[in-house]
Image (cartoon, grey):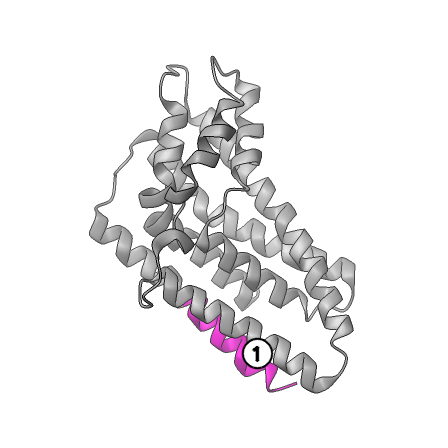
């Protein structure tokens, strides 16, 4: 497993416990309300759907990143693109950790609750077992700062792929690992919301942010080694 893969998996795991429980956990808890049949199988299907969306988005940004690398054939332009991408990842990491004075709308899912309610309305009423996977697919598209940063990282990594297919595979695999990393936290919150204190969540989330910041710095350094 490459260092990028490990970083994405750990960012998802730490960010899941630090960010998802506090910000997106209420969504998962809400999905269980009024459904006495809801069990671990339902939450697994929901998370498989969500991770599927992340993987598809990773494939899309992976292809985009490989196209960008192809068009950035001029050395100086390619260096600037890669350095700028790394800088954006660093900035997103700083914002996510709360070390830059930017509103929480960039890092949390709370401002998107109107979208959540509309999406959940599609699955209102008694839910069959088969409804949980498509629910995860739909809600996987919800905007979230941590996911934005992961997608940006996947796109940047795909710029080093030898062709578009390899870029797609690299982007999708990195987002798959990120999604898998976020799953344990959401499985736990689905059964016991608020299992971690606010202080513990902040620590996990900041660790995930530090990983993203480190990844961005690594990308910036790599850009100038081209």
**Quadrant where the image shows the N terminus:** bottom right
Q: Is residue 48 above or below residue 4?
A: above
**What's drawn in magenta, residue-wise?**
211-226
Q: Can the viewer see residue 1? A: no
Q: Mark 1: which secondary structure? A: helix
Residue 217 horizontal side relative to residue 66, left or right: left
Tell me, yes or no, whether the highlighted magenta stretch contains residue 112. no
Quarter holding residue 160: bottom right
- Where residue 138 sits: x, y (%)? 56, 34
Q: Can the viewer see residue 56? A: yes
Q: Which residue is mark 1?
A: 83
Residue at 51% across, 77% down: 218
Residue at 35% across, 30% down: 29
Q: Is residue 5 above or below residue 27?
A: below
Residue at 57% across, 35% down: 137
- Where residue 209 sits: x, y (%)? 38, 63
Looking at the image, which is closer to me, 119 or 179? 119
Residue 163 horizontal side relative to residue 188, left or right: right
Looking at the image, which is closer to me, 222 or 144? 144
Q: Main secondary structure of the magenta part?
A: helix
- Where residue 38 sits: x, y (%)? 41, 20
Q: Is residue 132 above or below residue 180?
A: above
Residue at 57% across, 53% down: 175
């Amino acid at each position: 497993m490459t260092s990028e893969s490990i970083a994405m998996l750990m960012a998802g795991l730490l960010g899941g416990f630090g960010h998802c429980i506090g910000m997106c956990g209420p969504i998962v808890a809400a999905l269980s309300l009024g459904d006495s049949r809801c069990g671990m199988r339902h939450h697994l299907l929901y998370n498989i759907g969500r991770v599927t969306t992340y993987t598809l988005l990773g494939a899309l940004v992976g292809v985009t990143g490989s196209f960008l690398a192809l068009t950035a054939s001029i050395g100086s332009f390619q260096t600037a693109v890669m350095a700028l991408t790394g800088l954006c990842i660093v900035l997103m990491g700083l914002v996510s950790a709360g070390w830059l004075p930017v509103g929480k709308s960039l890092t949390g899912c709370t401002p998107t609750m109107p979208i959540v309610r509309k999406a959940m309305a599609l699955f209102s009423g008694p839910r069959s077992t088969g409804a949980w996977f498509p629910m995860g697919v739909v809600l996987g598209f919800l905007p979230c700062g941590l996911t934005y940063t992961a997608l940006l990282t996947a796109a940047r990594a795909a710029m080093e792929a030898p062709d578009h297919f390899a870029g797609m595979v690299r982007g999708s695999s990195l987002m798959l690992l990120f999604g898998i990393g976020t799953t344990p936290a959401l499985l736990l919150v689905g059964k016991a919301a608020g299992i971690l204190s606010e202080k513990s969540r902040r620590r996990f989330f900041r660790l995930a942010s530090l990983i993203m910041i480190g990844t961005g710095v690594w990308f910036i350094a790599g850009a100038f080694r081209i």
